[in-house]
Image (cartoon, rainbow, N blue to C red):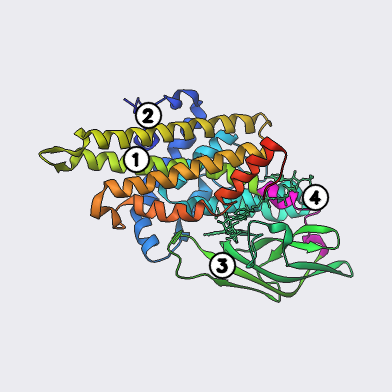
């Protein structure tokens, strides 16, 4: 029960959610699942251990159409948002760092260029980004605090028709490998977005070492010292904090699916272990308390799967509200983190080894629960929606 006729990677599927997907959606999910099983899983433990992002696999991800997959043009796959979610579910089943790479490229870089950019900016950047010939990063968070980005210190000042950018960004995924950074800065006209190209004089990056989380992902600081940004590199349709927040909605949506993928992987590993492990004369799986723990994992995964799917349907109908994304990000990352920790415990001492997925997933999800809005911020976003009072 709980498995039906779905591929192993799509289990547990206790409510036969597979039957709610179209053939196309299943095909997309299964193609990404094969890529994750064949290409990510054999190397991810080593990548995590040695703090290395598997950059060599990025062209294959591009070949599969995983970057900007919902755009209809610019060489993108033109998939619906349920497909996008299933892609994120599968990638994060592999590793949150791999899903992060795709989230940043698609949701935080291609999205703002597509939504807020000029035709020239779209033509210049979107086709190479879809092919991963150009990599992007997204600079919103600053050293003095990420939860309240409206008080950012990075500034852009008009100088003739150009802009001069000064400041710093912190904790930026893909920072040092990006060909273009989407940078948000305070101006006399409020917050605006800029395309900062890699070789811009005065623009430097530095990787953040010694992370115990998202080790298979590059995280950097960005520094801007009197960087001259040509007028044509400003995103004209992004005005105010709503610009960057609109991008966060896209990435948070993907995380709501991705975290469930990580939880599904952890559950399966715990289940397989309990079938094999014999303690007190019988397999662990026979123990009442183990069954309660496994059942509780599936209860939480099932609610997360249904929540993500309904969110995808709303997004495809153009009816999704960003506060609904906040509830899903909060709920699904929380269940992912709790299930990863629980699975780690069920695996016993062996569960602390990099050979096992749950320790890696739980360490990763410590970042996922913080980035793209901390759990508290999402609770307060939902609270404000319910009460009309902002308690940030
Ligand atoms: P607030 O008044 O709420 O909003 C200002 C304007 O923006 C609109 N808006 C949104 N639009 C689209 N999507 C959203 N999610 C939106 N949230 C708000 C809003 O309607 C308003 O529009 P308008 O026209 O009325 O001006 O602004 P606030 O200052 O009260 O916001 C507070 C708060 C806490 C909600 C916001 O600052 C917030 O979300 N903070 C968290 C910051 C965050 O999540 N940072 C993430 C950085 S990027 C990252 O972590 C990448 S990790 C990538 C990876 O590796 O996967
Ligand atoms: P703070 O904002 O300082 O928060 C500290 C604590 O205070 C948290 O527990 C928070 O929940 C709590 N808190 C905040 N406000 C309130 C309140 N009103 N009431 C009660 N408690 C509150 N950012 C980018 O811009 N681009 C990226 O690509 C990116 N990638 C990242 C990758 C990784 C691996 C990590 C870890 C972070 C990344 N971030 C990125 C940054 C991330 O978005 C921020 O870390 C996040 O927004 C939180 O900001 P902060 O770390 O400064 O914590």
Disc 2 Cβ-to-ligand 1 distance below 8 Å: no
Q: Is residue 292 left or right of residue 392?
A: left
Kind of element beneath mark 2 = loop
Q: Which mark is residue 237?
A: 4
Q: Whereabouts is ligand 2, in terms of quadrant?
A: bottom right
Numbered range of the magenta stretch: 231-247
2 or 4: tag closer to the N-terminus: 2
Nearer the observer: mark 3 or 2; the answer is: 3
- Give the percent coordinates (x, y) of residue 124: 71, 56
Q: Which mark is residue 267?
A: 1
- Give the percent coordinates (x, y) of residue 238: 78, 51
Residue 75 in view in this figure: no
Q: Residues within 10 Å of mark 4 (few under 14, many from 20)?
A: some
Kind of element beneath mark 1 = helix
Q: Residue at x 83, y 69 (%)?
A: 157
Residue located farthest toward the left when viewing the structure as drawn: 281
């Amino acid at each position: 029960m709980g498995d039906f006729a779905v591929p192993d990677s799509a289990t547990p599927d206790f409510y036969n959610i597979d039957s709610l997907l179209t053939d196309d959606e299943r095909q997309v999910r299964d193609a990404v699942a094969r890529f994750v099983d064949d290409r990510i899983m054999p190397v991810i433990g080593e990548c995590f251990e040695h703090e290395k992002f598997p950059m060599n696999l990025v062209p294959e991800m591009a070949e599969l159409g995983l970057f900007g997959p919902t755009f209809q043009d610019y060489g993108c796959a033109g998939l619906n948002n349920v497909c996008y979610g299933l892609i994120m579910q599968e990638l994060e089943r592999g590793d949150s760092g791999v899903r992060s790479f795709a989230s940043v490229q698609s949701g935080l870089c291609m999205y703002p260029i597509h939504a807020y950019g000029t035709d020239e900016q779209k033509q210049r950047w979107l086709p190479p980004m879809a092919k991963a010939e150009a990599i992007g990063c997204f600079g919103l968070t600053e050293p003095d605090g990420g939860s309240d980005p409206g008080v950012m210190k990075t500034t852009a000042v008009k100088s003739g028709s150009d802009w001069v950018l000064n400041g710093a960004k912190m904790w930026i995924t893909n920072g040092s490998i990006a060909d273009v950074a989407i940078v948000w800065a305070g101006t006399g006209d409020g917050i605006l977005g800029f395309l900062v190209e890699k070789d811009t004089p005065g623009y430097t990056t530095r990787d953040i070492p010694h992370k115990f989380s998202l080790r298979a992902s590059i995280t950097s600081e960005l520094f801007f010292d009197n960087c001259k940004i040509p007028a044509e590199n400003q995103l004209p349709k992004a005005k105010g904090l709503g610009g960057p927040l609109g991008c966060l909605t896209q990435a948070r949506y993907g995380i709501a699916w991705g975290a469930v993928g990580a939880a599904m992987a952890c559950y399966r590993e715990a289940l397989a272990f309990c079938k094999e492990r014999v303690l007190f004369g019988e397999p662990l799986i026979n123990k009442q308390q183990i069954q309660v723990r496994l059942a509780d994992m599936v209860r939480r995964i099932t609610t997360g799967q249904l929540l993500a799917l309904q969110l995808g349907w709303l997004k495809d109908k153009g009816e999704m509200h960003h506060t609904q994304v906040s509830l899903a990000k909060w709920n699904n990352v929380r269940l992912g983190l709790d299930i990863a920790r629980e699975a780690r415990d069920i695996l016993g001492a062996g569960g602390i080894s990099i050979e096992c997925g749950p320790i890696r997933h739980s360490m990763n999800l410590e970042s996922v629960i913080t980035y793209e809005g901390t759990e508290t911020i999402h609770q307060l976003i939902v609270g404000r929606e319910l009460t009309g009072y902002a308690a940030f």
